[in-house]
C-alpha cells in the first residue's frame, strides 16, 4: 500500500487536477451532507491527471490524494488530527484490496460522506443547542446560497416567525440576520482559502447583492478584504 502519510511531503504534482473540484472539500469541511450528496463526487473527473498507466492503480492513487485532501480540510475545520488520518488510512486500506474501479469509486464516495457526516456531528456537538435550533442551523447552512429570512426557517420548523426569532436569539445570543451573515462570511473564508473561485462568484454564490457589498461586509467582519484574506492564507493552502 502507498501510505498516505508519506505523500505529504511532495504532493504538488497530484493536486493540480483537483483545482476545479476544491469546492467539494468545502462541503466536506463544513459538514454539508446534503450538498455533498447533491454533487455526488466522482474520481472520474475530466482532466484528472494520470498517475499510473494501470487503470486500477491510477484511480487508487487518486483516492489516496483525495483522502489526504479530506483529512487536511477537516483538520483545518476542527477534526482531531489522529481521527482524520485514521479515517484516511482506513479507506486507503479498503481501496488497496479493491479489485475494480467501480469498487474504488464507491469507497471514495463513502469516505467523503463519512468525513462530511463526522464534521456535521462535530459542529453540532460543539454548539450544545437543542434539536430545534440545530435543525434551524442546518436549514440555514443548506440555504446560504439564496436570500434567506427568519420566516423561511420558521416555516420549515412549523412555528411562527416571532417565536422562532425570539428563541433563536435567546439560545444563540445572536439575532437571525447577523447570524446568517456570519455563516456566509465563514463559508466565504473556506472558498477563498480552498478554491480559486473569483471573489465576484463567491459573492454571488452566497447571495450577496454585489461584490462591493460582499467585500465591505467581509472586511467589517474579518478586518481585511477578501483578496487580502486569500493572499494571507495562500501559504497555508494545502490543496
Image (tube, rainbow, N blue to C red):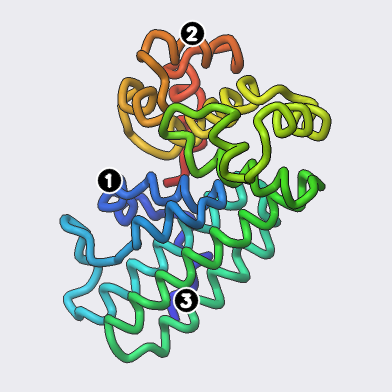
**SS assignment at label 1:** helix
Please rate how many residues cluster around mark 1, counting C-alpha atoms within 10 Å: few if below 14, some from 14 to 19, many from 20: some
The tag on residue 216 is: 2
Q: Earlier in the sequence, mark 2 or mark 1?
A: 1
Residue occupying image coordinates x 67% and y 40%: 159
Mark 1 lies on residue: 20
Q: Earlier in the sequence, mark 3 or mark 2?
A: 3
Q: Quadrant of residue 96?
A: bottom left
- State the quadrant of the N terminus: bottom left
Pair 3/2: label in front: 2
Please rate how many residues cluster around mark 2, counting C-alpha atoms within 10 Å: few if below 14, some from 14 to 19, many from 20: some
Which residue occupies the foreground of this view, 133 or 184? 133
Please rate how many residues cluster around mark 3, counting C-alpha atoms within 10 Å: few if below 14, some from 14 to 19, many from 20: many
Position of residue 129 measured from the top left corner of the image (x, y, whole percent): 79, 45
Pair 1/3: label in front: 1
Q: Quadrant of residue 172?
A: top right
**Number of marks present in the image shown:** 3
Which residue occupies the foreground of this view, 227 or 143? 143
Residue occupying image coordinates x 16% and y 55%: 47
**SS assignment at label 2:** helix
The tag on residue 141 is: none
Q: Give me the C-alpha separation between circle 1 and circle 3.
A: 23 Å
The tag on residue 92 is: 3
Q: Are marks 2 and 1 in contact (CB under 8 Å)?
A: no
Pair 2/1: label in front: 2
Residue occupying image coordinates x 72% and y 48%: 132
Position of residue 232 measured from the top left corner of the image (x, y, whole percent): 50, 23
Position of residue 73 measured from the top left corner of the image (x, y, whole percent): 53, 49
Amino acid at each position: 500500500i502507498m501510505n498516505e502519510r508519506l505523500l505529504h511531503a511532495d504532493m504538488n504534482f497530484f493536486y493540480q487536477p483537483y483545482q476545479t473540484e476544491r469546492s467539494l472539500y468545502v462541503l466536506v469541511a463544513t459538514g454539508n451532507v446534503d450538498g455533498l450528496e447533491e454533487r455526488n463526487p466522482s474520481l472520474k473527473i475530466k482532466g484528472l491527471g494520470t498517475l499510473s498507466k494501470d487503470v486500477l492503480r491510477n484511480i487508487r492513487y487518486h483516492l489516496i490524494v483525495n483522502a489526504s485532501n479530506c483529512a487536511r480540510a477537516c483538520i483545518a475545520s476542527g477534526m482531531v488530527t489522529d481521527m482524520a488520518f485514521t479515517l484516511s488510512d482506513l479507506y486507503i486500506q479498503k481501496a488497496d484490496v479493491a479489485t475494480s474501479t467501480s469498487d474504488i469509486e464507491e469507497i471514495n464516495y463513502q469516505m467523503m460522506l463519512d468525513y462530511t457526516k463526522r464534521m456535521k456531528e462535530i459542529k453540532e456537538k460543539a454548539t450544545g443547542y437543542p434539536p430545534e435550533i440545530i435543525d434551524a442551523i442546518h436549514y440555514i447552512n443548506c440555504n446560504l446560497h439564496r436570500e434567506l429570512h427568519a420566516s423561511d426557517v420558521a416555516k420549515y420548523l412549523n412555528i411562527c416567525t416571532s417565536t422562532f426569532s425570539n428563541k433563536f436569539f435567546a439560545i444563540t445570543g445572536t439575532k437571525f440576520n447577523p447570524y446568517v451573515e456570519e455563516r456566509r462570511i465563514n463559508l466565504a473564508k473556506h472558498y477563498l482559502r480552498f478554491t480559486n473561485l473569483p471573489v465576484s462568484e463567491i459573492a454571488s454564490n452566497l447571495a450577496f447583492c454585489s461584490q462591493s457589498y460582499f467585500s465591505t461586509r467581509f472586511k467589517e467582519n474579518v478586518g481585511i478584504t477578501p483578496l487580502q484574506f486569500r493572499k494571507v492564507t495562500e501559504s497555508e493552502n494545502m490543496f
